[in-house]
Amino acid sequence: MSYHPDVFNAHCKLREKITLEYLAPNVSRGLNRQRFRAKARLYLANDVEALAREKPDEIMEALEAKSIVGVGRYEILKEIVRGIDVRMVQDIEETEAEIRRLGGTAVMAVENTESDDPNAMDYTYTCKEQSAVNPMNPRRAPNVNSTHTGPTPVINQPQTSTSPTDNQAPQIPHDFIYRVSPDNRGRALIFNMANVTNNTPLPGYHQDASRLRGLLTRLGFAVDVFDDKRRSQVFNFLRDAQNDNHEDFNAFICCFLTHGDRKKYDRNDMNVHRSNENYIFSADHQEIYIEDIVGMFNAENCPSLNGKPKLFLIQACRGTESTQGLQESPAADHDHRSPEVIPHFADTLLFNSTVQNKMSYVGPGGSRFIQSFCDMLENYHRTLDLMTICTFVCNDVAEKGTDEKQMPEIRSTLRKLCYFR
């Protein structure tokens, strides 16, 4: 099918505005491009070559080549860009209205493509050619605008293959992915210390705890929330979880929402050996060292979690310094194999809301860190691994605020990719 030049011009202008204005490297922030790639790949899951594409214009070409997007066919494109930048959705809807105005329908075709008349007009050519062809003297070109109802998104399950061809992206062997079944996720503990003695109440943590509970429950975790517990109670709950039999579970999550600080050097302190370590507060204002929490669930102290991913989310300050910003410069599974011998502290991801010595921010609607983590996990858990999601969180949190900036920090001993599909 071919289209009137005005209709096709409107389509090409929209395409260029999205790829060259909103998603161009020198204009758009990196997270928007990452989100666009991740959401578009849902619709390209069976095309290995298309999945290897990185640039927005190349991804758009792949969507058009598969007739997922085309002239007057923008429903899936709107789904892809929705939540990335509302202006893109508005531009798509304006283009739809323009096409309807020009043709009275979604598209206006010129049905003389088979004519032998040399003066007959055929408006079938690609948007790349559009910039080099006079619309009033068009030439024939391959048509990418065939009728298509749009595919159902398919999640690309990694397949076992270690020898990709020249035009094929390398695929991830199963041995490089943790087995985290939706039927046996595991336990998730959330300690919500919104009210710590001698510290400012942080009611926003109730929002964080509520959202985390809902999201992790939907992902299949058995979630327990503990509000404002004393230090002794915290360790009682942690020891209960440590002594649980996790053999039938695939993962473990522990989250603290509280105040925190860094241990300063004092030679008279009986805990002088813990200088520069980070600690958080229980509700009775007692110190709990983060390393003690993490250590309770290593392979030696919790054997039933051996070889399984363990995520620790710490939403708390790690000091009293604020973070300033600068302008960005331009430019464990159950396969029948011999058991692995792995280090005791393997398979752990400690995700801190901020870097050493710096403060962490929380408002009435929740903390930047936990709200961003929930956003990214909710949006991308079907397609991206946990480390990539955490990297997205780092970028998202780093972009928030103006004078009071915040930079999360990842410390990982994960040996494989972890998906919560």
Image (cartoon, rainbow, N blue to C red):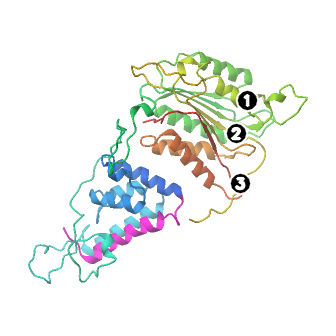
Kind of element beneath mark 2: loop
Residue 365 in view (yes/no):
no
Where is mark 2, residue-wise?
A: 316
Q: Estimate the x, y position of residue 65 in percent, counting from the top left.
A: 28, 59
* Type of secondary structure dominating the magenta stretch: helix
Where is mark 1, residue-wise?
A: 289
Kind of element beneath mark 1: strand
Tell me the kind of residue under disc 1: Tyr
Based on the picture, tell me whether residue 3 belongs to the magenta stretch: yes
Q: Estimate the x, y position of residue 42 in percent, counting from the top left.
A: 36, 48
Kind of element beneath mark 3: loop
Q: Quadrant of the C terminus?
A: top left
Q: Which residues are magenta?
A: 1-29
Q: Estimate the x, y position of residue 189 in percent, counting from the top left.
A: 59, 28
Q: Residue at x 53, y 29 (%)?
A: 309
Tell me the kind of residue under disc 2: Ala
Please state which of the two labelled residues, at mark 1 or mark 2, is closer to the viewer.
1
From the viewer's perspective, is residue 248 above or below residue 205? above
Classed neighbour count for the residue bearing mark 2: other residues with Cα under 10 Å, few (<14), some (14–19), many (≥20): many
Q: Nearer the viewer, residue 7 or 210?
A: 7
Give the image quarter of residue 82: bottom left
Where is mark 3, residue-wise?
A: 404
Classed neighbour count for the residue bearing mark 1: other residues with Cα under 10 Å, few (<14), some (14–19), many (≥20): some
Q: Residue at x 22, y 67 (%)?
A: 142
